[in-house]
Each structure stands twice: as C-alpha cells, then as structure tokens.
Image: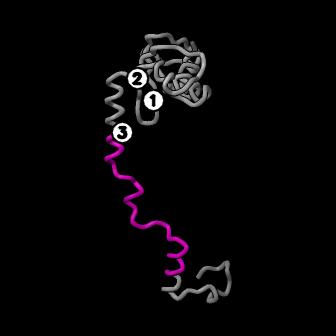
Amino acid sequence: MRLDKWLWAARFYKTRSLASDEIGKNRVRVNGQDAKPAREVKAGDTVAMRQGPVTRTVLVRGLSQQRGPAPVAQQLYEETPDSIRLREAAAEQRRLTAEPAGSLEQGRPTKRDRRSLDKAQNKAWGDRWSASVDS
C-alpha cells in the first residue's frame, strides 16, 4: 500500500495531497529512511512523522484501502511508548510556557482609547485645516 494513502486512511492527514506534501518535505520517515509518497508500507514498518513541534513514531499494524471512522483508523497503528512520552512532555511544556502576546502591556490603541487621547490633548477634528495634513 502507498505511504500517502496509508497516512490518509490512518487519519494523520485530512487529504492524500496533504500527506503527499508532508512526505515531500521530508517530514515522514519509514524505518529510519526518507520516503516518497509511493513507497510501499507493510505491517510491521515503523513510520516517524513530524507534526508541528512533535515527532510521532508509530508501528504499522494494519492496512486499509479506504478512510474509515476514527476508531477503525486507530487500529491501523500503534504509537511507541517513547513517542507517547515525548508528545505528553511537549504538551506539558506548551501548557506551562507563557503566551508571548500576554507579555505585551501596550499595543495599538482602540478607537475608544484614541478618542480619549485626542480629547486629553484637546485635538478635535474641527481644529484641523486639512484632513491630509497631520499637525
């Protein structure tokens, strides 16, 4: 069975073309070697794929020619214990890390803030002699 078709059937990617693109970007390896979308996959192979910041390693347990419901797709593979541990550690790290945008104290003022700033500086629209010249 083709690798891109198996990844699609096992529900790692939403479409075969997405699976094929990820394989083409060398984000998927089979038995420790770079793969191509047409590479044959059989039961017992080890597939390592990088999804975002996490690398998942799974053992191929079964093959399916069609994409089925999630419980059926989960029977096609078994994730390795090391992969599970690393994925959970990465999730915990993301949970504990502060949101970068949370550290910003000031940003672009809202329309309401801008009006209050203009009022505080006694700048009104009628004080300008031209809309294009900002003084």
Residue 32: give x, y in percent of width and height.
42, 16
Residue toward you, 20 or 26: 20
Do the numbered discs 1 and 3 sit on residues whose CB atoms are within 8 Å?
A: no
Query: Label 3 belongs to which residue?
Result: 91
Query: Label 2 belongs to which residue?
Result: 57
Residue toward you, 128 or 77: 77
Q: Quadrant of the N terminus?
A: top right
Residue 104 vertical placement versus 87 (above, below): below
Which residue is at 34% across, 34% downward? 88
Rendering quarter of residue 14:
top right
Query: Label 1 belongs to which residue?
Result: 50
Asked if the stretch drawn in magenta spans residue 12, the answer is no
In the drawing, does residue 36 fall left or right of residue 103?
A: right
Residue 92: give x, y in percent of width and height.
32, 41
Residue 66 vertical placement versus 119 (above, below): above
Asked if the stretch drawn in magenta spans residue 100, the answer is yes
Residue 58: give x, y in percent of width and height.
42, 21
Marks 3 and 2, how far apart at CA: 16 Å
> Which element carries disc 2, helix, strand or loop?
strand
Q: Which residues are magenta?
A: 91-116
